[in-house]
């Protein structure tokens, strides 16, 4: 059976510690916000959480090193992902800024999505938030942007419509 490893969050560690203290003693009873014992438990649980993160990172690093040594092959370098963005069934706060990660074709391009809900498999207009290349669009333009001029001189489509 394969089990997955999940880090326990700091509030979960603190809640479990408080529950343990409550069930194993009748002398410590004040766990209200700002109490000394609660502050102490939260500080200790924060340190435990930080140590767990360091431990998990060390394990991941050791696994990578062991795999590399076992097969005597160099690891492939990371590469950037690029392509169209599709959001599915999520709520976006208004406004949400979507940044370009492909700096070779679109340096510093970011779009501001103006409405609060993007239904699944739907495309809505994006609004350009930085000034484009002439004869491109101005920043904070009120009309939806469907095409913009990339630095390479080619027009790119900003929305699926």
Image (cartoon, grey):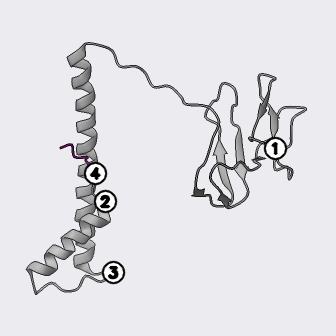
Judged by its main secondary structure, the magenta piece is: loop
Labels 1 and 3 touching (C-beta < 8 A): no
Q: Tell me which label, 1 or 2, sits earlier in the chain.
A: 2
Q: Residue at x 75, y 39 (%)?
A: 158
* Residue, disc 3: 33
> In the rendered image of this protein, does residue 112 appear above or below residue 132?
below
Q: Which one is in front in this view, the residue at disc 1 or the one at disc 3?
A: 1
Q: Residues within 10 Å of mark 3 (few under 14, many from 20)?
A: few
Mark 1–mark 2 distance (CA, rounded to whole Å) = 41 Å
Q: Could you say which disc has been placed on residue 9 in the image?
A: 2
Q: Residue at x 21, y 69 (%)?
A: 16
| Rendering coords of residue 62 (x, y %) | 22, 31
Labels 3 and 4 touching (C-beta < 8 A): no
* Residue, disc 1: 145
Identify the magenta region. 1-6
Q: Residue at x 33, y 15 (%)?
A: 74
């Amino acid at each position: 059976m394969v089990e997955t490893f999940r880090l326990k969050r700091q509030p979960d560690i603190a809640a479990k510690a408080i529950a343990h203290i409550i069930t194993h003693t009748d002398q410590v009873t004040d766990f209200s916000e700002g109490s000394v014992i609660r502050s102490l438990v939260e500080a200790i649980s924060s340190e435990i959480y930080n140590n767990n993160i360091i431990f998990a990172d060390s394990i991941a690093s050791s696994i990578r090193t062991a795999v590399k040594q076992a097969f005597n092959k160099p690891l492939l370098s990371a590469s950037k992902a690029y392509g169209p963005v599709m959001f599915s069934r999520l709520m976006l706060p208004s406004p949400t800024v979507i940044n370009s990660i492909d700096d070779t074709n679109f340096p510093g391009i970011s779009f501001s999505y103006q409405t609060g809900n993007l239904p699944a498999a739907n495309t809505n207009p994006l609004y350009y938030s930085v000034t484009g290349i002439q004869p491109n669009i101005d920043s904070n333009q009120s009309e939806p942007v469907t095409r913009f001029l990339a630095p390479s001189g080619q027009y790119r489509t900003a929305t699926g419509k």
